[in-house]
Amino acid sequence: MKLSHVDEAGRARMVDVSEKPVTTRTARAEGRVWMSRDAFELVQAQAVAKGDVLTVAEVAGVLGAKRTGELIPLCHPLGLEHVVVEVHPTPEDPGVRVVATAKAVGRTGVEMEALTAVAVACLTVYDMVKALDRSMRIGDIYLLEKTGGTHGDWRRPDQAPDTIGGGTS
């Protein structure tokens, strides 16, 4: 298997997408932050000193998606058409689940934008809650599904069918 970000001499390179067709491309990713029960209860009650953790994390995730081309060296800067970041409390396993959907019309996919949105939102939760629980754990960040492009649609095999595009997940 040939890696698209490596040239014949083994050097890293940005992929030339100029010959790819322009299509609508969408990607959805998720991640988790686990925290203590005490910290979770304060987050849920919106009683964290830094403010509304869930809303700030959602906004931070959108900003992260918009800056992906600046953060990931070989990513193309994209004009995103739509980004939705949702942070859902998970009381059964104290913490939050972050789901991000990114959409663009272009020559390259938006998987990295969705994944970056999730990572930035998770890091924002950590930043806002760290005074209450420094042992929080961030993880399980992965792509759920993507549509469009020359490789077509893809969905994680372990995921139930879902509507992609920015609704409640």
Image (cartoon, rainbow, N blue to C red):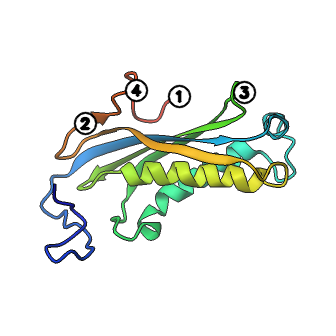
In the drawing, what numbered circle is on residue 91? 3
Q: CA distance from mark 1 to mark 2?
A: 20 Å
The mark nearer the N terminus, 3 or 2, is: 3
Q: Residues within 10 Å of mark 2 (few under 14, many from 20)?
A: few
What amino acid type should be assigned to the residue bearing mark 3? Pro
Q: Quadrant of residue 159?
A: top left
The mark nearer the N terminus, 2 or 4, is: 2
Give the residue at mark 4. 159
The mark nearer the N terminus, 1 or 2, is: 2
Give the residue at mark 1. 168
| Between marks 1 and 3 in the image, the one whose residue lies nearer the viewer | 3
Give the residue at mark 2. 153
Q: CA distance from mark 2 to mark 4?
A: 14 Å
Above-or-below relation of 133 to 66: above
Relative horizontal placement of residue 132, taking residue 95 as reference (left or right): right
The mark nearer the N terminus, 1 or 3, is: 3
| Between marks 3 and 2 in the image, the one whose residue lies nearer the viewer | 3
The mark nearer the N terminus, 1 or 4, is: 4
| Between marks 1 and 2 in the image, the one whose residue lies nearer the viewer | 2
